[in-house]
Each structure stands twice: as C-alpha cells, then as structure tokens.
Image (cartoon, grey):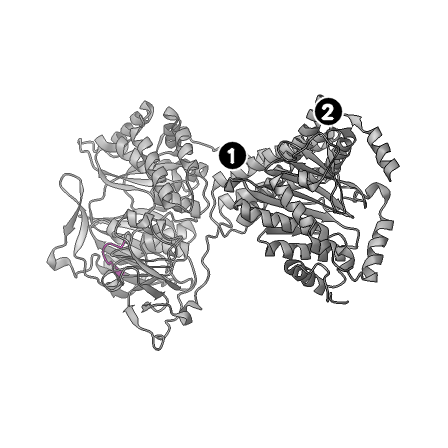
Amino acid sequence: MGFLSSLFRRRRKPVTAESLHAFRQRYVNFLELLESNSELLRIMAEIEDKLLGRELFGMSFVRAMATRAMFHARRMVGSLDALSGGRHPAIGRALEEILERLRQELREQVVTEVSELVLPYKRISRDMVDAVGGKNAHLGELSSRAGVPAPRGFAISTSAYRRLLRHQDLEDEMRKRLMAIQPDDPRSLEIAGQEIQELFEAADTPAELVEAVHAAYEHYIARPSGGKPLVALRSSAVGEDSTLTYAGQYLTLLGVGPEDLIAGYKRVVASLFTSRAITYRLHKGVPFEDSAMSVACLEMVDARSAGVVFTHSPLSLTDDRVLVQSVWGLGPYAVDGVVPPDTFIFERSPSGPRLVERQVSRKDVRLALAQDGRLARTDVEETLREQPSLNDAQATELAALALRLEEHFGGPQDVEFALDQADRLFIVQSRPLRREGPEESEPLPPVPGREVLLSGGETAFPGVGFGPVVHVRDKEDLLGFPDGGVLVAAHSSPNYVLAMPKAGAILTDTGSVTGHMASLCREFGVPSILNARTAVETLLPGEFVTVDAISRRVYRGRVDELLALSRERTVLMQGTPVHDSLSRLAKHIVPLHLTDPAAPEFGPQGCSTIHDVTRLVHELSYSEMFSVGDRASDHEGMAVKLRAPIPLDLYLLDLGGGLAISDRFVVGPEEVTSRPFTSVLRGMTDERLSSRVPKPVNIGGFLSVMSQQMLTPPNLTVERFGDKSYAIVSDKYLNFSSRVGYHYSILDSYCGNTVNKNYVSFKFTGGAADEVRRNRRVRAIALILQRLGFTVEVVADRVSARIQKLEARDIEPRLEAMGRLLIFTRQMDMLMHSDASVQHMADCFIRGDFSCAGLPEE
C-alpha cells in the first residue's frame, strides 16, 4: 500500500496557474448548470400548477415563464459546452430549434385594424368586434339589420384607441405600471390603475382624432337647425358583451356636451384600467394586449323610464320566460341596483309575449338629466312612487322587441332600453345573456337550534358561505377586504368585483338580480343575497355568520350542516385566453420524452422540448464533472485528499477559507474550516454509523445488486465502488459530489449569517439493484428528507430536495443529518426487499437506529 501511495504521488503533475484557473472555471460552470437546472424545474412545476386552472395569473406570468425558461436552458447548454470543452454542439442546435418554436408562440398576433378613426352605425355589423368592440358591433347590428329603434350616433374605433396609445409612447408607460401589479394585492391594482388613468388624462390627443370625432358629431348627431344634443359616451371594449359580460366594469358618461367629447372619450378609454376592470380581466384570463377600447357616441335619450329585458331567466336554464325590469329616470339606477325595479314577467306564445306577472316596487328616487345637462339624483313625485314605470303595453312591446333580437342574434339576450318623454322606446344595448352557476335550489328548512339573524331578499347566486361580517362603504374598505369575509353593503355595485375573489358571501340591502353586480356574483360564484333590506343594520362588523343564499337566511356563527353543502370556489382559468396561451407555450417547455439514458433516442436527436434538453444536459454534466474532478486529483496542489474514517475516496478543492492548510496533498477533518462541510463530516463520522452491527443482508437483495451489476455493459456503468468523490468548499459554501457504491449524489449548500442566502439542495440517483428496489430506496430517502423539513420531489429513481432561508444554526443539523444519510444509503438497495421496508428504514434513520433492527421480511 505504501508503494502504491508513493507511486501515485510521483505520478501527480505539477499545477500551473493556468490549469488551476481553468479547473476552477469549469466548476463554476458546473455550479451555474446546477443552479439553472433547479430553476427550470421550479419554472416547470409552476407552469404545471397554473395549468390546473385554479390560480390567478396573467400574460405577464406567461411571458415571464417562457423568457426565464429560455434563459436557463441556454445557460445550461452553455455551461455544459464550457465544462466539456465543446464536445456536444448538437445539443445547442436542438435547443435553438425548440426556442424558435417557442418564440413563434410568443409573437403577438397582428391585429387587423380598420383605417377609420370613427364609423357610422349604418356601416357597422356584429362581425366587426375587433374594429369597434362588442357593444358597438351590436348597436350597429340593431341600426343596420335588426330593425329595432336605436339612438343616432357613431363609433370611435379601436384604431383610434391604438393611435392614442402610440402617441407620446403611452403604451410603454402603461406596461411598466402593469408589470408592477401583484394579482392578489388590491392596493397594487389600485395604484397601477390610478397612475395609468392619470397618464390618459394628461396625454395630448392626436389632432386627427380630435378632428374626426367633432366632424362625426356634426354629421350624425347635430341638428340641421343648429341644435347641439347631449350624448352618451359608452364603453365598447373588445371582448365586452361577448362570452364575458364585463358587467359594469367600464365607464359610461351621460349628458356629455360637444365641447367635452374628447375629455369624455379619454375618461371612458382610461376606464380600461380602473382597479376593478384590471381585477376582472385578471380573473377572466384576458391579456392586456387583447384589450382595446372603442367608444359609442349616442344621442342622449332624456329617459322618462329605463331598464333591462332578459329573454331568459339569468338564474335558471329551464325558465324561458321574458323578464322586463324598469325604474323611473335613467337606466343606471336599475342595473346598479340603487332602486328596486318594477318587474314584468312574460310567457312565450305563438301570438307574442303574454304578461303573466307584474310586481310594482316603491321607487323614491331616480337619476335624471338636469337643465344644465348634468346628472342629478332627484326625488320621484309622491304620486308616482308606487306606480309602474311602464304600462303593460310598453312592457309588452319591449318583450316583443327583445324576442326579435333573440331570434336575430341566435341566442338569449340581455337588453337595455330607455323610454323618452314622448313615450318612444329606444334599445340602447343588446348583448348575449350569460347564465352562470347552478340551477336555483329548493329552499332548505331552518336549521334546528340555530339563531337566524336575517331572512328574506333575493338570491343572485345560490350557495353557502361563512366568515366575519365586513361592512363596505367605500373603495378603501374594498382594498383591505380580508379573505373569507362576508361583504355587507347598503346597495349593490359592480365595484365589489375587487372583493369577489376573496368574499365568502355578499349581502346588500338593495339590488337587483338582473343588475351588473348580480351578473358578476354569478360569474365569480359568490353566494349572494340582494334586497336583504336590513343587512347593514342587523349584522355587526366582525361577527361570524353563515350565509345560506339558497334559502335566503343568515345564521349567527358557523353552521356546519349548511357548510357541508358549499362547494370549493376557485378561480377557474381554464378556457381563458391567458390559459390557452400558457398551454401552447407549455408544450414546448414541460413534456419529458427522454427518460431512459440507455435508450438510443437519449441524445440531441430525441429532444423536442426544453425539458428534454435539460434532462440530457443534466445527465451529461455528471460524467463531465467527474471527469474534471479526476483530472484535478492528478494535479499536485489543485485538489487534496481527505483522510477520514469514511468509505469514500474524497478530494477537496478549496475556493477560499474552506481549509486551514492548503499546501498538503492529504488533510484531516481537523483542518476543514468550511462551515457546511464540517457539519456534513460530523454526520459522516457519527460513531453510531461506524459501530453499528452488520445489517441483515437479504440474499434476494444481494443477488439483485450483483445481477444488475454483471448485466450492465461496461460503457454504461458510470458509478463503481471505489471511484473518487469531490467536494468544492469555501468558508460558507459546499458542493459535494459523492459516489458511494453505485449511487451518486450532489449536496449543494450555503451556510452563513445571511438567512436569505442559506439553503441545502440535495440530489440522489443511481443504484445497482433492480428498478423495484431502487424505487423503494428513493421513497425511503424521500420520507427521511420530508421528516427533516425538506421540500422533496421523486421522479423514477431520483430524489431532489431543498430547504432554504433558515438560520445557520438550523441549517447545520440538517447538513449533519445529510452526512449520516450518505453513509446510511450505501447498502440500502440490498435491504429494500418489501414495501414495508420503506417506512421501517425511514423510521430507523430518524430515531438513530442505523442497524435497522427488526427489518420486516418479505
């Protein structure tokens, strides 16, 4: 042995500064490769998690994931190239082909734009949604093809919106603020939205847009006699009034004079970026790039009464009766639920709609146009307060018009109307009726022994919710709304969309089940009771209540009998544009086809995804790294041998501060000053490991190991007993590449005084036993690591684990345990002869019984 040792020392080559630098640089490349591999695994896990559709994300997430995946894949390939001296050029070519396909998916689709900044309704049809938005497309269809009365006016196109964005680089400034949004933080949404709206307000409007709008007003709205009618400016965003309602999310301005057209236009366009509108689009998976605002400019109808018509019940898929609801004055008080509306219900018949039910509400106030054109809340005359705001003939005519629109558009419609002072009916909007959620359930009997705090009202969305009462009076209450809170308010409002993702239930004293907020409650699946009358007065802030929106009761405290009926409510992203975009990108990133290193396709030719490339690079990096390490041990002064009572031929490379002495070929444990490696060594030299009685080797396990070893071709056998292992050390860092038997592992750690930097990362693979025993082994190791607090992932016969951001005093005992684990796994394959041995081995390790006494037999 002395002769062989002296012979080995004589053959060691002297180290040069150049060779030492090259050696260290290759290890740096290897560390970068491992870092990027770990990051890519996290990226792919996050993509797969988001593809389940249960969590909220936007296009910024999609692009960020794709960009990060491309960066780290390139970094891994570059690191392997540097580590191997350029021996694998085909991998780089395969990756670039994959990345080009990924970039193709990322490229924004070219939006076909009309050239005109404004369009008259007689030239607009419903197939022009991209040019004028959903609302304008439907209004154009009403005017040009459906033959129903509609106000005069014109549309300001999406081309005008994009022209405004390009002016003074508004789009770039908007993107900066949108990127700062945290989807689950309402305050970040509010800040970004407010700043973007201020950008619109301060922006100059292109001269050609100003001229086009004023010219269209003079041509399509102004009277020949010189009259200058007021107009309504209504949002018509792309996607609005389609499969998503966007109910009440964007701005409508009523009573706008010709001198205020441009300022009003910019306010409506800016409403794309109110906090509630941003929240809605995030939860519906609509990318910023897919949102463009057109604006409807309509002659103002001085409404005597107004309201909505539904050609089907919004709550029941089987109820095809027509529902007409109206209030005195302008329509917002009906759709926003400020005033309880009159209701007329019609059955369908061959001769036309037949009135079967009439409900007249008390209507104390209305929204009306004042003499100066401003909107004003006014009292309804006492004689009219309990009178119907429509007569039966007017309601019947509305029902017939709505059914005509249903036939024209080929589906149930949600129609808004106005009746002017001359009793002329105008249809101001028609959109597809979106019916959300389950069928309305049969009311339940009161729960015995439970106190009912409130009963009555109307169900906007059936279900059961529980939580603390939160009174909402203003936007500040919405921004601070807690998870699971029960929102209680005086009247309904589409602004409450800000809290809907968090709300356990919603109760309002007034409101209509046909209003904007009710539509949003159904879209978001929030159990909701409207017209509860005394919710604000009765329910005290902070008290916990159970809301039964099926039977319209509110109970004190938690009622488990009812909560058993509740269903998990999640943000369902599946089917949204954002989810579809992520799905298309994911197919180039996530799938793994290279699973067997011995298969002929395990090479660049078999790579079709980023995951395939990184799997191949990761596999090759081990052999390249061990090759570099072997070369280092052949150079005197580059790597030193550790002499310690451990079953490893271990060499150390000190990057600075890891060893007390650096000019020897052999060092002992007492000369190791690396904080993380000292802990690992303490575990590897644990006396309980060295003094344990021999394990009861199972003969089946022994034969399995030996047969696998003998059947493995020499060129495919990477790990052999007695091969060298390597550790790169510094005072606070360790990268330990260990070959123990037929296993190999990589233990990577930083252990210092900065908590946020501290981590332990562990990867373990290999084994000479059959696949079943290797699988049992990794399951046992995974159990051990989980008991130690690691986040663990198992794929085939590989274990990956990580723990991070702990104090050094909490990192060190885990590193010590990792040292014990490395020794403990040496002959584990031969002992994994039954599934029962998995739990037994993990239990033995945790309690320090390394003899594994009482190992279950087959």
Judge from the rendering whether residue 71 lies leftward or rightward of residue 263; answer left or right.
right
Q: Nearer the viewer, residue 746 or 385?
A: 746
Residue 266: x and y, percent?
30, 33
Q: Residue furthest bottom?
A: 448
Q: Quadrant of the N terminus?
A: top right
Q: Magenta region: which residues?
A: 337-343
Residue 757: x and y, percent?
53, 40
Which one is earlier in the sequence, the residue at label 1 or at label 2? 2
Q: Residues within 10 Å of mark 1 (few under 14, many from 20)?
A: few
**Is residue 15 one of those drawn in magenta?**
no
Residue topped by disc 2: 19
Q: Quadrant of residue 681?
A: top right
Q: Quadrant of the C terminus?
A: bottom right
Which mark, by number, is residue 109?
1
Which residue is depicted at the point 61% across and 42% down?
676
Residue 59: x and y, percent?
48, 40
Judge from the rendering whether residue 491 lies leftward or rightward of residue 753; answer left or right.
left
Judge from the rendering whether residue 159 lies leftward or rightward of residue 668; answer left or right.
left
Q: Amino acid at mark 1?
A: Gln
Which residue is depicted at the point 50% across and 43% down?
578
